[in-house]
Amino acid sequence: MNVIIDSKEYYTDGNAFFRIIGRTLYECNPLPGVEEVVIPDRVYEISRNVLGENKKGVKRIIFPRALERIESGAFMMCNSLTEIDIPWRVKYVEEYAFSSCKDLERVTISEGVKTIDNSAFSNCEALSYVSIPKSVTCIEPNAFAYCKRIEHFEIDINPSLKVSDTAFSGTAISSEVRESLMEHFCYMKDNPLFPF
């Protein structure tokens, strides 16, 4: 169902109002008390700061299988978000996409994703489970920086994988994982060696 609010057209599923132009989601306004938001199937791209000031209470976001892009900062500081599954058509988890989501505990990235960009999941204080598929060939600087509670870090290492020397700064990933990533490490000018 479509509705007009302040001369903007919105689609609603009964739990949230979505402003979609073409195939891009520009706004998502969940109703009070809604904890799970299902992004409509017709959305292929999610713009920056899509939840705006409406971040409180949203614990889970279900992405459509056809989703191809999550822009930088799209869900930044969505503090009540607890888990996300990145669909396979999203090739890049863009910078700051989920940065500073304080309650985010679980991240599963689907086979097909190629790059985890700069600070994509940085400062996610509760993050304890991360699963990265073999399709990922690049983990950029600070991608998981200061995620201090990572207990389960699962990665299927691609032989072409490149990992920034600061991708895991301030984290507590196991020495076993660190050792498995060493040969894929890319040093950046003027940065210290593998800063754990």
Image: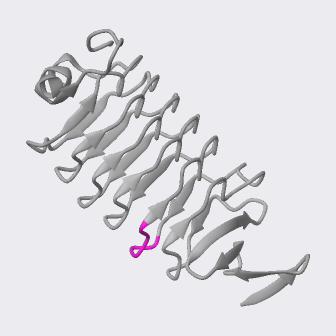
Who's the residue at 71% across and 79% down the image?
14
Q: Is residue 175 left or right of residue 95?
A: left
Occupied quadrant, residue 91: bottom left
Residue 92 at x, y = what percent? 38, 54
Residue nearest the viewer, comparing 164 with 67: 164
**Please, which residue is most extreme toward the bottom here?**
1
Residue 140 at x, y = what percent? 35, 36
Magenta part, dominant SS: loop
97 over 61 or under it: above or below: above
Occupied quadrant, residue 160: top left
Q: Is residue 66 magenta?
A: yes
Q: Is residue 188 magenta?
A: no
**Please, which residue is most extreme toward the right here?**
6
Q: Is residue 115 left or right of residue 24?
A: left
Residue 13 at x, y = what percent? 66, 81
Residue 189 at x, y = what percent? 33, 17
Position of the N terminus, as image quadrant, is bottom right
Residue nearest the viewer, comparing 160 with 130: 160
Who's the residue at 70% across and 51% down the image?
55
Who's the residue at 76% across and 66% down the image?
31
54 over 9 or under it: above or below: above
Q: Which residues are magenta?
A: 64-68
191 over 44 or under it: above or below: above
Position of the C terminus, as image quadrant, is top left
Residue nearest the viewer, comparing 80 with 146: 146
Residue nearest the viewer, comparing 190 with 120: 190
